[in-house]
Amino acid sequence: MDVILLLKAAIMGIVEGLTEFLPISSTGHLILTGSLLGMTDAKSKVFDIAIQSGAILAVLIVYWARIREALLGLSHSEKQRRFVLNILIGFLPAALVGLTVYKLIKGYLFNAPVVAAAFIVGGLIILWAEKRTQPKARVESVDDMSALDALKVGLVQCLGMIPGTSRSGSTIIGGMLLGLSRKAATDFSFFLAIPTLVAAGVYSLWKERNALSMADLPMFMVGFIVSFLAAWVCVRWLLRYVSSHTFVPFAWYRIAFGLVVLATAWSGVVVWAD
């Protein structure tokens, strides 16, 4: 058993768990961390996607009561059917885009200028969104969302496929700009992550199944478990944070990280390419 490899897997799991649901782009952080740790081969790229499942498990546990209520109420509750349908509607745009043009996105947009620009522009958008005069939210909770609201947020989620943009950042800030309350946008972002990230993980593992073996299982399990623990702490913290704070600190962090991307690319420390 390669202890160093397991330690690297644990570090990657921490990075994934802490960044997946914050508006700061887990992809950018995994690229930087993976490059510094020497985890840049094809297997490592599959590993990056697979450990998202640990983060999703954390969301399932934190929101289990709400998810269980929805599943049990599908047969007799219009409210629960609407809730589940909205998640499926929100997931659909990302599924279609992922199956059709994600290869092109990875082929042409996975480079330092795009990643840095996405970080910096995203940070500026968050600053603008937080400083503008906020009207009273039109949608106070996910149960108040219409199918059109879900579709709009789902379309915004597609922006998260651009490396450096952040799936959670796109859905949370986009949701707020579309009239959702901070709490509703954050909750829906978490719920929408469940089918989106599970589908991405299953698709990636299936596509690269011939490159994996049972010998890789310890590395994947360590990454999964650590990602779950880090994400569980992060999600619980973020839900408390959004009740009384803005996303401005994350905006400044994004801008600073965008400069880090440019510096690491210029110096050759990180190869920002697929």
Image (spheres, rainbow, N blue to C red):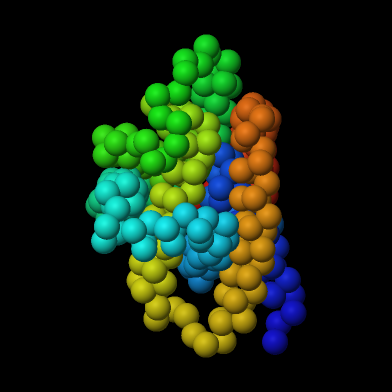
Which quarter shows the N terminus?
bottom right
Task: Look at 52% across and 21% down and name the residue there.
Answer: 129
Q: How many marks?
A: 0
Residue 56 point in image, percent of width and height: 51, 60
Q: Looking at the picture, does residue 248 appear above or below residue 83?
A: above
Which residue ends up furthest to the front in the rendered image? 76
Task: Look at 34% across and 58% down and name the residue there.
Answer: 73
Q: Looking at the picture, does residue 2 appear above or below residue 228?
A: below
Tell which of 35 and 62 is nearer to you. 62
Task: Look at 51% across and 60% down and name the residue there.
Answer: 64
Residue 228 point in image, percent of width and height: 61, 64
Picture quadrant of residue 39: bottom right
Q: Looking at the picture, does residue 50 appear above or below residue 2?
A: above
Task: Look at 26% across and 39% down and name the residue there.
Answer: 147
Tell which of 264 and 87 is nearer to you. 87
The reply to whether residue 33 is visible in this rendering is no
Residue 181 point in image, percent of width and height: 48, 29
Tell which of 146 and 23 is nearer to you. 146
Is 145 on the left-hand or right-hand side of 187?
left
Is 13 on the left-hand or right-hand side of 71?
right
The reply to whether residue 232 is visible in this rendering is yes
Residue 20 point in image, percent of width and height: 56, 51
